[in-house]
Amino acid sequence: MGACFPTYPKDTYLLRLEEIPYPKKISLNTLKELFRRSEIWDEGIPSLRETLIKLFRKQQDLGFERDLSLNFSNEKIAAHTKEFQVYQEWHEIRSFVKKILGTDDDGWIAPERDFTEMKARNKMLFDYYVSKPDLNKTAGEVRDLWPFSLDT
């Protein structure tokens, strides 16, 4: 096992989600969604923060007997909202490019595919995306969001 694998306390695997005491207004699926956010290694912190902010905002509606130790100021929520919009756009671009190019998350392609052709397609997709009439970003802003290198 390398250093890139997430580490968890030894007893975590003994904890079963069904055994956690939680307000009955929260579905087990909601809790699973929260604990699924351990995928931040791949997804980044904005998706976890989005889940925590939703939980913070609805903690009384969800039936918690006391306030959770989650606290987000209006300024932090506003800053997160802007960051989360960028994150969602990045995620959409990444999914689009991965699907069209047939790559994995890291941009790897099957060895039998022509790497030069894939690089050309990546550049072509970038040019296409930048030329979209409803795009409200500069080419530089899109380049910053683009998931794979555009260097030739």
Image (spheres, rainbow, N blue to C red):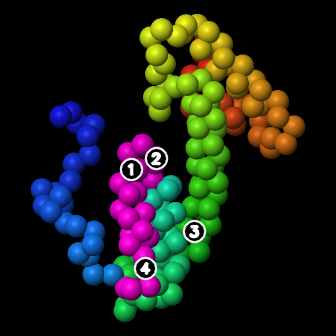
Q: Which residue is mark 1?
A: 39
Among the two numbered marks 1 and 4 on one chain, the one whose residue lies closer to the N terminus: 4
- Residue contact between numbered discs 2 and 1, judged by CB atoms under 8 Å: yes
> Is residue 152 highlighted in magenta?
no
Instruction: Give the Cα separation between the discs numbered 2 and 1.
Output: 6 Å
Residue at the extreme right: 133
Residue at the extreme bottom: 65
Q: Which mark is residue 26?
A: 4
Instruction: Give the Cα separation between the discs numbered 3 and 2.
Output: 19 Å
Q: Amino acid at mark 1?
A: Glu
- Tell me the mark number nearer the camera, choosing from 3 and 4: 4
- Tell me the mark number nearer the camera, choosing from 1 and 4: 4
- The residue under the point 23% across, 75% down is 19
Q: Which residue is mark 2?
A: 43
Question: Circle 2 — which element?
Answer: helix
- The residue under the point 20% across, 53% down is 8
Q: Amino acid at mark 4?
A: Ile
Expressed as whole percent of the image width and height from the top left, the position of residue 12 reads: 18, 60
Q: Residue 144, can we see it? A: no
Among the two numbered marks 3 and 2 on one chain, the one whose residue lies closer to the N terminus: 2
- Residue contact between numbered discs 2 and 4, judged by CB atoms under 8 Å: no
Q: Which mark is residue 77?
A: 3
Instruction: Give the Cα separation between the discs numbered 3 and 1.
Output: 22 Å
Q: Please report the bounds of the magenta region as a residue range.
A: 23-45
Q: Callout 2 environment at 10 Å: few (<14), some (14 to 19), or many (20+)?
A: few
Query: Which quadrant holds residue 127?
Result: top right
- Tell me the mark number nearer the camera, choosing from 3 and 1: 1
Looking at the image, is 64 positioned above or below residue 80?
below
Query: Which quadrant holds residue 68?
Result: bottom left
Q: Callout 4 environment at 10 Å: few (<14), some (14 to 19), or many (20+)?
A: some
Expressed as whole percent of the image width and height from the top left, the position of residue 84 reads: 59, 56
Q: Callout 1 environment at 10 Å: few (<14), some (14 to 19), or many (20+)?
A: few
